[in-house]
Image: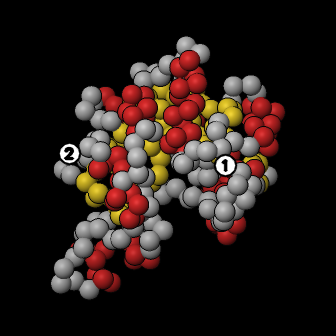
Amino acid sequence: MKVLAVIPARYASTRFPGKPLALLGGRPIIDYAYRVAAGTPGIEAAVVATDDERIFAHMEQAFGQGSVMMTSSEHRSGTDRCGEVMETLGQQGRRYDVVVNLQGDEPFVKPEQLQALVSCFEDPAVDIATLKTPIQESGELFSPNNVKVVTATNGKALYFSRQPIPYRRGVEEKEWLREGRYFKHVGIYAFRSTTLAEVCRLPQSGLECSEKLEQLRWLEAGYSIAVRETAVANIGIDTPEDLETAESELRRMNEKK
């Protein structure tokens, strides 16, 4: 099974302009995700997909030709950017069975997380794979910024929501975590290459527009999403404040070495 990792990277973030090149521990944030993807056993190639010349220039200087690709500025999502990279490489004769969509703003992603995603495709019924991690605090559970996921007994996703799911009727909210397990979605995906090409052509769906969650478009269209559990609660960097949190985590990790 040939696997490609694509790391979408936009410069023009509303909440944090220039985020991919912001420094974390003295290195641009985008470097962390790329190094993990490129160094994970089983991943044949890793490419940063950007629409910005500054990110492109940095990647070529730091990691060499082939580490980055310029993509359209018209894409609606990182998924569409991954689709363009896959299509362009395919036209060059470089075809892959599975494409991993790795967020460039999650610097602490682990190789074993990527390998867990790829292993899902040993099941021929799996179209898409993603991760979840247990929720430990009520603040996480009730924050709309944390996407929750519920799965079937076979590990396939039933639904994703910004609301806490499942709802616990007759139980005070402060007791919900004691009554059962809740899971936060970790926004890393992997696709069969045929599935990626198909979902990039799908129109937005009603559930997607309601929750502002792209994965609901895929569920509504009937795709099977396998969800693996990970103990690693990745830190996403969406704001300058998140970068401060990441700096603290990096210092903590370095002190443990």
Residue 141 x, y percent position in the rendering: 39, 72
> Considering depth in this image, is 45 or 207 the residue closer to the camera?
207
Q: Is residue 103 above or below residue 66?
A: below
1 vs 2, front mark: 1
Q: Is residue 214 visible?
A: yes
Q: Left or right of 126: which side holds 139? A: right
Residue for point 58% across, 52% down:
106
Q: Secondary structure at mark 2?
A: loop
- Check disc 1 and give the amino acid type: Arg
> Considering depth in this image, is 150 or 247 the residue closer to the camera?
150
Residue 177 x, y percent position in the rendering: 31, 74
Disc 1/disc 2 C-alpha distance (Å): 35 Å
Mark 1, other Cα within 10 Å: few <14 / some 14–19 / many ≥20: some
Q: Quadrant of the N terminus?
A: top left
Mark 1 lies on residue: 10
- Check disc 2 and give the amino acid type: Asn
Mark 2, other Cα within 10 Å: few <14 / some 14–19 / many ≥20: few
Q: Left or right of 139: which side holds 55? A: right
Residue for point 67% across, 41% down:
50
Could you say which disc has been placed on residue 154 in the image? 2
Residue for point 31% across, 28% down:
122
Could you say which disc has been placed on residue 18 in the image? none
Q: Secondary structure at mark 1?
A: loop
